[in-house]
Image (cartoon, rainbow, N blue to C red):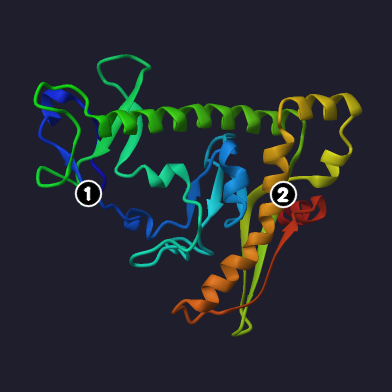
């Protein structure tokens, strides 16, 4: 269980961070948050989809790391099977959280229960005078960029919603055993609706750089085949015979409701 705590020099003067850190903290994580500024790099390795938070109408963009809960096909003991690592997981054991002493203010936090944290590690957060070390300053800068990217991501998703550009998908998987599985609740961009945008809207999107994440997200869907390949190369006995995304049609939704 993570113990996420705001970093304060008064209480964490002696805390240090390991110089060598792996990604074992997400070894059982099948999705990971991703932000729009990262889409172009992430699309070279992962399918990028939107998911909706349970009980809310809020969408989040994520990369798929596995085909079922608890499965991460990119994580190996000492390596990561992709060139790009999403910011949200590469920052471990650090994250952004609310500062209990300042209302509505975000601050740098650390997971005190992480195996990368302890008084016997290499990187100090504070020097002998209680000032932020160069290492900690770098961490805070990276967290700041992550926050800025998350804000941009929220705005990007709002643009997609405001212009009705989302398409609900289902992922159909057929296994070598003959069994099949369907994953639902996934969303991507409706390419047809993008093509139907008015000339004024196209120009507006182009000037604001929105087509970069749009087409990166659309192109990333083909990476589902990479997930199938990684599954078939793994020790899993459930080998994939066929896999594809399909739009959830209005007819299918109506039938499901009945």
> In which image quadrant can residue 178 be found?
bottom right
What residue appears at the point 35 percent right and 55 percent down from the top-left corner? 23
What residue appears at the point 63 percent right and 56 percent down from the top-left corner? 184
Observer-nearest of 55 and 178: 178
Residue 218 is labelled as 2
Residue 46 is labelled as none
In three-dimensional space, the C-alpha distance between marks 1 and 2, rounded to whole angstroms, equals: 36 Å
Observer-nearest of 250 and 158: 158
Observer-nearest of 143 and 188: 143
- Per the image, label 1 sits on a secondary structure element best described as loop
Whether residue 129 is visible, yes or no, is yes
Residue 99 point in image, percent of width and height:
29, 21
What residue appears at the point 12 percent right and 29 percent down from the top-left corner? 13
Observer-nearest of 200 and 255: 200
Examine the rendered structure and indicate whether residue 43 appears above or below residue 128: below
The residue that disc 1 covers is 116
| Crowding at mark 1 (Cα within 10 Å: few <14, some 14-19, many 20+) | some
Residue 170 point in image, percent of width and height:
68, 58
């Amino acid at each position: 269980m993570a113990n996420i705590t705001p970093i304060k020099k008064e209480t964490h003067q002696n805390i240090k961070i390991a110089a060598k850190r792996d990604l074992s903290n997400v070894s059982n994580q099948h999705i990971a948050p991703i932000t729009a500024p990262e889409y172009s790099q992430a699309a070279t390795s992962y399918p990028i989809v939107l998911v909706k938070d349970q009980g809310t109408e809020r969408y989040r963009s994520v990369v798929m790391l596995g085909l079922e809960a608890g499965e991460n096909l990119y994580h190996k003991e000492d390596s990561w099977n992709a060139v790009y690592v999403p910011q949200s997981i590469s920052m471990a054991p650090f994250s952004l959280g609310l500062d209990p002493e300042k209302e509505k203010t975000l601050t740098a936090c650390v997971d005190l229960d992480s195996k990368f944290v302890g008084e016997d590690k290499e990187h100090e957060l504070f020097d002998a005078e209680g000032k932020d070390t160069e290492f900690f300053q770098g961490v805070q800068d990276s967290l700041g960029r992550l926050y800025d990217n998350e804000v941009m991501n929220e705005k990007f998703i709002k643009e997609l919603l405001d212009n009705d550009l989302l398409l609900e998908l289902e992922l159909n998987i057929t296994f070598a055993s003959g069994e099949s599985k369907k994953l639902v609740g996934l969303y991507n961009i409706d390419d047809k609706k993008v093509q139907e945008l008015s000339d004024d809207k196209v120009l507006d999107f182009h000037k604001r750089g929105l087509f970069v994440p749009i087409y990166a997200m659309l192109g990333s869907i083909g990476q589902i085949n990479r997930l199938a390949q990684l599954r078939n190369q793994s020790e899993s006995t459930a080998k994939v015979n066929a896999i594809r995304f399909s739009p959830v049609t209005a007819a299918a939704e109506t039938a499901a409701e009945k």
